């Protein structure tokens, strides 16, 4: 085995050895140089060296910065002269324009075309700009061009507004829409009160609950809109007015001005917050309304009895405490007086009166605070000793009769009462007809057979309706008396006293039969009757409970009159054929038997329709023309539909039109509709179904002057079956009240308001018909047949330049008295406001005529008046009414701009509306699932 050789050297070891040797040499020489430097220059030399280096670097940086800046400026200057346009027409020119004097803007001060209106309007514009814009604008700029442009925009809007107003027919707004909206508002309030009363519990805040319930009823009635947010939330109210003003500016301003947002916003805020909002707040303030009511009836002296009635009926503790405090203050003053002689007795009487007022207020406050409110009617019915009203007094008093009529209908004895009333009317009218006949005979005029024939026809009509075998319901009376009456009617001329024996028996039956008058005195309706007659405490009738002393009253006042002329003696023959059509509509002067058309009689314009009538019988044939007005058609339609109730659903008379009803196109359309009405009426099947109808048709088409008095018989006799009316709880008050109201604006307005104020539709229709007839007589006696023309003239007067100028002046003086912006009037003390409420209610009750109480009852009158007054004591509800009037005003002024849809959208965020839709959806969902 050979020995090992020498080791082989590593190839990487040589470079590593050379590198380490080099690094050692560098460090060695460096350390040697540092030591020599420190030994030579000292230990602080290193700091000097670092400072020199820093100064060198900083100096180089500054030199570079200065050199770059100068070169950059030279470059930019070269670029500006080479590429950018000249600036000589830019900013310097604008500065020169601003230094020049502003050119005056010419403003045309004409607004409406009437100087008496333009002058106060210009002052209103000037005051508005001064107090709402100028006081802060001049702190920003002295340039008036902006103010002049705002003024010009306002004037342009007023010019457009004035032009629209002149083109608008305001008569329907004032005579129909305004009244309907007020009636609807009152109906909603009445239903809200009834709904709260049904709950029966004492609520902590009844006023707030009433407002919520009011808007619940509103959305149920309106279906599409509810104004609760606008009326209860100030923020939403301001937003609504801003949106509304912006829409008006869009309509009235030129597009260029409307697109100027700054000016538009200024004008919008001036209109909404500076003018409309303060005005609406003032008109909605209950205290302002109460003061206005007192001012309107300031000529009436306060009545102590009315005042005490208000105190006793008040359900507001605040009112009672305010009156009590004032009475106590007056009492202290009177006791402090030092008087002698006759003045002592006067002061003692005043002190006693004040002590009585304080006592009544204390008693009423304690009762309200304890929650033990007493219903006078229930208390009297259960414990009170009631006075007795004799039956003969009940039958002649309209208020008492309506309660007795309601009771008789409940017991099924209405036929007896209606027979008694009809005979009363027959007797009165027959006596009048015979007196007229006698006077004509003295004058040499002979109409004996015709009058007797009509008298016989009327007597037969009464017999057939109440006493014959076919009568339903039939008056149950001695058959011998009925047979004797039938014999008399067949063989003798009827006299006014022909029904007296039977009428006396019917009276005794109602008086003695336990089902009728004796039971009526034990019924709650009797107590309510006494309340309406103001006889629960101070009875004026005294009588025995057993009915002794009752006597038959031959001809009472207030009885229902019958007219005999509505029954014609034309025989009913099935072989006679009758054809009629309206042939002519020619415009001419007044001559009703020469030419048909639009006529003028003593200033009253109306239309006549020429009716060509063919009457054919087996032995003869004749043709004639007769002339009728639309009111004649209406009166005829009313007569036959009340006598033949089945015709009401078949025959439809063309509707009325109060204004512009002399237009040629309208008359031609009405002529076609009336022709269709005549053809349906003369249909043979129609005549066979109602044979007695022929008498009315012959009389209407006969060639003679038509007398509307012939409708009295049909109008006055109360129907045995009362007409049913649609439930008014959830519907608006509409323009047509019913088919029986004449084309008479004041009658329609008064009847509508009485319906809503006194809730007449909840009472029997006999009372309502009597009230309508009384109003007709009152209006005709006061104004005659020209009342509609007078109302149209009054509306024209209200919208005349003089009245508009007067309204603008009142607005100006109210907001800027003596040219100075009026300060916000501080709210009056609560006690003063409460006493004003008491004074307002007292004044209203005081001015109510006694005749109204006699017609509808004292209790109903008080409740109706106090309901209206209470409605105005809620700011939110007053705002709702103001906004409804404003909405209808804009819808009338801008009929083409779909304001109705706009208002629905603006009120769409209503919480009540959302709840209503949810309830509606929840009620409809189960039915949809079943399907």
Image (cartoon, helix red, strand yellow):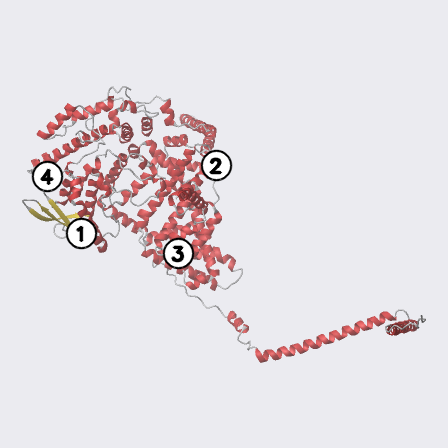
Q: Is residue 765 visible?
A: yes
Q: Nearer the viewer, mark 2 or mark 4?
A: 4
Relative to residue 827, is residue 899 drawn left or right? left
**Mark 4 and mark 1: Cα distance apart in space:** 34 Å
**Mark 1 and mark 3: Cα distance apart in space:** 43 Å
For the residues bearing labels 2 and 4, Cβ distance under 8 angstroms: no
Give the mark nearer the N terminus: 3 vs 2. 3
Q: Position of residue 174 (x, y in %)?
A: 32, 48
| Within-10-Å neighbours for mark 1: few <14, some 14–19, many 20+ | many
Q: Is residue 339 visible?
A: no
Give the mark nearer the N terminus: 1 vs 2. 2
Q: Secondary structure at mark 1?
A: strand
**Mark 3 and mark 2: Cα distance apart in space:** 44 Å
Give the mark nearer the N terminus: 2 vs 4. 2
Give the mark nearer the N terminus: 1 vs 3. 3
Tag 2 residue: 205
Residue 571 numbered mark, or none? 4
Residue 599 numbered mark, or none? 1
Q: Secondary structure at mark 4?
A: loop
Q: Nearer the viewer, mark 1 or mark 2?
A: 2
Tag 3 residue: 121
Q: Secondary structure at mark 2?
A: loop
Give the mark nearer the N terminus: 4 vs 1. 4
Relative to residue 484, is residue 738 drawn left or right? right
Q: Position of residue 716 (x, y in %)?
A: 21, 36
């Amino acid at each position: 085995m050979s020995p090992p050789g020498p080791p082989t050297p590593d190839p990487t070891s040589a470079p590593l050895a050379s590198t380490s040797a080099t690094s050692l040499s560098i460090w060695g020489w460096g350390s040697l140089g540092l030591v020599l430097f420190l030994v030579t220059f000292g230990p602080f030399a290193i700091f000097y060296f670092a400072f020199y280096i820093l100064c060198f670097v900083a100096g180089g940086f500054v030199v570079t910065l200065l050199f770059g800046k100068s070169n950059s400026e030279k470059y930019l200057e070269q670029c500006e002269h080479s590429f950018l346009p000249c600036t000589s027409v830019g900013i310097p020119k604008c500065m020169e324009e601003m230094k020049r004097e502003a050119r005056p803007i010419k403003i045309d001060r004409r607004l409406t075309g009437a100087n008496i209106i333009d002058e106060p309007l210009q002052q209103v514009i000037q005051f508005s700009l001064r107090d709402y814009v100028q006081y802060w604008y001049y702190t920003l700029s002295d340039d008036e061009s902006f103010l002049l442009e705002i003024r010009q925009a306002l004037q342009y809007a007023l010019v457009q507004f004035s032009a629209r107003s002149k083109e608008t027919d305001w008569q329907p707004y004032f005579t129909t829409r305004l009244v309907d909206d007020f009636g609807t508002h009152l109906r909603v309030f009445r239903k809200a009160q009834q709904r709260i009363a049904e709950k029966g519990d004492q609520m902590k805040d009844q006023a707030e609950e009433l407002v919520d319930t009011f808007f619940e009823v509103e959305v149920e009635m309106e279906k599409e809109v509810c104004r609760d947010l606008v009326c209860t939330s100030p923020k939403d109210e301001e937003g609504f007015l801003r949106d509304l003003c912006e829409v008006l500016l869009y309509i009235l301003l030129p597009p260029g001005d409307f697109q100027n947002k700054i000016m538009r916003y200024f004008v919008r805020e001036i209109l909404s917050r500076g003018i409309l909002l303060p005005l609406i707040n003032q008109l909605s303030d209950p205290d302002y309304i109460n003061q206005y009511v007192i001012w309107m009836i300031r000529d009436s002296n306060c009545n102590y009895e009315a005042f005490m009635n208000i105190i006793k009926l008040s359900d507001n503790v605040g009112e009672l405490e305010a009156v009590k405090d004032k009475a106590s203050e007056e009492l202290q003053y009177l006791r402090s007086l030092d008087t002698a002689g006759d003045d002592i007795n006067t002061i003692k009487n005043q002190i006693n009166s004040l002590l009585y007022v304080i006592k009544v207020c204390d008693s009423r406050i304690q009762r309200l605070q304890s929650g033990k409110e007493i219903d006078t009617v229930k208390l009297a019915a259960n414990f009170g000793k009631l006075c007795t009203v004799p039956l003969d007094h009940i039958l002649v008093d309209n208020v008492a009769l309506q309660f007795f009529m309601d009771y008789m209908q409940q017991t099924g004895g209405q036929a007896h009462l209606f027979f008694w009333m009809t005979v009363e009317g027959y007797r009165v009218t027959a006596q009048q007809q015979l007196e007229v006949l006698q006077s004509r005979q003295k004058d040499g005029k002979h109409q004996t057979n015709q009058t007797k024939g009509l008298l016989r026809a009327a007597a037969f009509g009464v017999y057939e309706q109440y006493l014959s075998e076919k009568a339903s319901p039939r008056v149950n009376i001695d058959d011998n008396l009925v047979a004797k009456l039938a014999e008399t009617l067949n063989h003798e001329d009827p006299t006014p006293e022909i029904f007296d024996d039977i009428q006396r028996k019917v009276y005794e039956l109602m008086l003695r039969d336990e089902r009728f008058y004796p039971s009526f005195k034990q019924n709650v309706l009797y107590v309510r009757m006494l309340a309406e007659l103001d006889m629960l405490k101070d009875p004026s009738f005294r009588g025995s409970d057993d009915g002794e002393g009752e006597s038959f009253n031959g001809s009472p006042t207030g009885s229902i009159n019958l007219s005999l002329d509505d029954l014609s003696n034309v025989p009913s023959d099935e072989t006679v054929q009758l054809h009629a059509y309206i042939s002519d509509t020619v415009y001419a002067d007044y001559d009703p038997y020469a030419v048909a058309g639009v006529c003028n009689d003593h200033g009253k314009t109306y239309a006549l329709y020429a009716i060509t009538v063919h009457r054919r019988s087996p032995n003869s044939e004749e043709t004639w023309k007769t002339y009728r007005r639309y009111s004649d058609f209406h009166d005829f339609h009313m007569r036959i539909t009340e006598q033949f109730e089945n015709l009401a659903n078949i025959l439809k008379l063309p509707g009325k039109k109060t204004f512009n009803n002399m237009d040629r196109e309208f008359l031609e359309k009405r002529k076609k509709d009336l022709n269709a009405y005549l053809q349906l009426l003369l249909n043979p099947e129609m005549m066979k179904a109602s044979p007695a109808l022929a008498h009315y048709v012959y009389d209407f088409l006969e060639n003679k002057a038509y007398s509307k008095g012939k409708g009295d018989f049909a109008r006055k006799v109360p129907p045995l079956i009362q007409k049913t009316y649609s439930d008014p709880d959830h519907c608006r008050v509409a323009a047509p009240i019913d088919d029986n109201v004449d084309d008479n604006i004041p009658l329609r307005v008064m009847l509508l308001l009485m319906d809503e104020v006194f809730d007449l539709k909840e009472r029997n229709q006999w009372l309502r018909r009597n009230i309508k007839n009384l109003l007709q007589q009152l209006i005709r006696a006061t104004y005659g047949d020209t009342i509609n023309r007078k109302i149209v003239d009054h509306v024209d007067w209200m919208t005349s330049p003089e009245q508009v100028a007067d309204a603008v002046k009142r607005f100006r003086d109210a907001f800027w008295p003596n040219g100075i912006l009026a300060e916000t009037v501080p709210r009056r003390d609560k006690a003063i406001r409460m006493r004003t409420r008491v004074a307002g209610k007292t004044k209203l009750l005081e001015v109510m005529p006694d005749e109204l109480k006699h017609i509808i009852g004292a209790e109903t009158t008080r409740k109706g008046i106090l309901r209206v007054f209470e409605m105005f004591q809620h700011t939110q509800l007053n705002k709702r009414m103001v906004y409804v009037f404003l909405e209808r005003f804009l819808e009338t002024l801008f009929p083409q701009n779909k304001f109705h849809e706009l208002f629905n959208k603006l009120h769409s965020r209503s919480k009540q509306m959302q709840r209503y839709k949810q309830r509606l959806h929840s009620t409809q969902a189960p039915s949809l699932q079943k399907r």
